[in-house]
Amino acid sequence: MNLDRAPADAPGPDPFLRRWILAGFISLAVAAVVYGLGVCTRWGQQFGDAAYAGRMTAAPELRSGALDVLDTLRAASVVLIGGGAVLTALVRRRPRLAIVVAAVMGVSILGAEVLKRTLVRPDFGIDPAGMTANWTPSGHTTVAVTLVLGVLMVVPTRLRGTVAIVGALYAAAIASGTLAAGWHRPADAITAALWSFAVAAAGVVVLAWWRGTGVDDADHIERRRLHPIAVSVVVVLPIAVLISSLAVDHDPLVFTGVNGRFVFASIVIDVVAAAVVLVFTRFLRGVELDAPQSGTTTELSGSGGGDAQPVRG
């Protein structure tokens, strides 16, 4: 018997798990790079402070609108949306999903606060008075992105496309709004969005390992709803609103001064926040997390891999 060759039916690494583990690590790595460059270097601090100052040259309507958007994330609304996501999982008879989503929200939001108090902001002597403390990651951005990803985890696959479009727009508005309102610098919002993705990805991995993931026939629905045109609209719309708002009183296309750096930073924040939501949705395409066992659902083993096998109820 040839021991050098594995049996033909030997289970291999689970592609679903591999994808999410890799995505989570990449997200954390990029967040670390953004923190390192944007917070721990003189150039990064100069750019962040300039973008922060640039908001004061923007149209007053933009700053007022940003405050209105941020005001939607009150404690009551966070509890309502987060509790609604957990309740949705329970109503759909997915207790493990409810537990993991609740844990993802708790770890992501509380973890962001711990990081904000743990990470340091080197003093290069360039920060204005009262702005020398570390603000990374943004709490509001973390809450917004985490809530959107939590809802995406619990809704049926046929609804994920719609939730992703609305959620990406909302996450982008909150993330760039923290800069426009003067609550955070650019690196704070970007690292928060990436941190939220990494924690949610870890939650998906836990679910796949704990229970497995069900694949249903709604894959073609999600594929159609996440058409590239729709994705482009989600990314372009916040940018168009931002630029048109700034253009009321100022020329936003000159990227040499603080105004231009504010515009550029806002665009990057919008794109990153929207991309986090859309990539998360794309990776979940056609997958029902913690799917109830039934004869019509196919389950992918989170611990082994290999070919999908029918689940007997």
Image (cartoon, grey):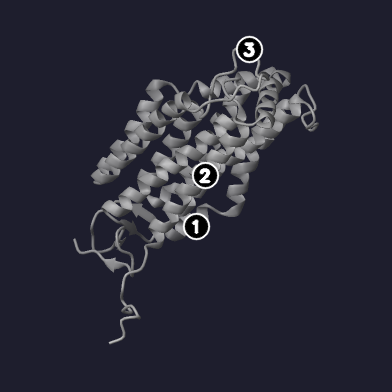
Give the mark, 3 or 2, whose residue is nearer the N terminus: 2
Q: CA distance from mark 1 to mark 3?
A: 50 Å
Regarding mark 1 in the picture, which secondary structure is present there? helix
Q: Could you say where residue 163 lies in the image, as x and y percent from the top left?
A: 46, 42
Q: CA distance from mark 1 to mark 2?
A: 29 Å
For label 2, the residue is 29
Q: Residues within 10 Å of mark 3 (few under 14, many from 20)?
A: few
Regarding mark 2 in the picture, which secondary structure is present there? helix
For label 1, the residue is 223
CB atoms of marks 1 and 2 within 8 Å: no
- Kind of residue at disc 1: Arg
Regarding mark 3 in the picture, which secondary structure is present there? loop
Residue drawn at x 78%, y 26% is 257
Q: Nearer the viewer, mark 1 or mark 2?
A: 2
Image quadrant in which you'd find residue 218: bottom left
- Kind of residue at disc 3: Ala
Q: Residue 129: which disc?
A: 3
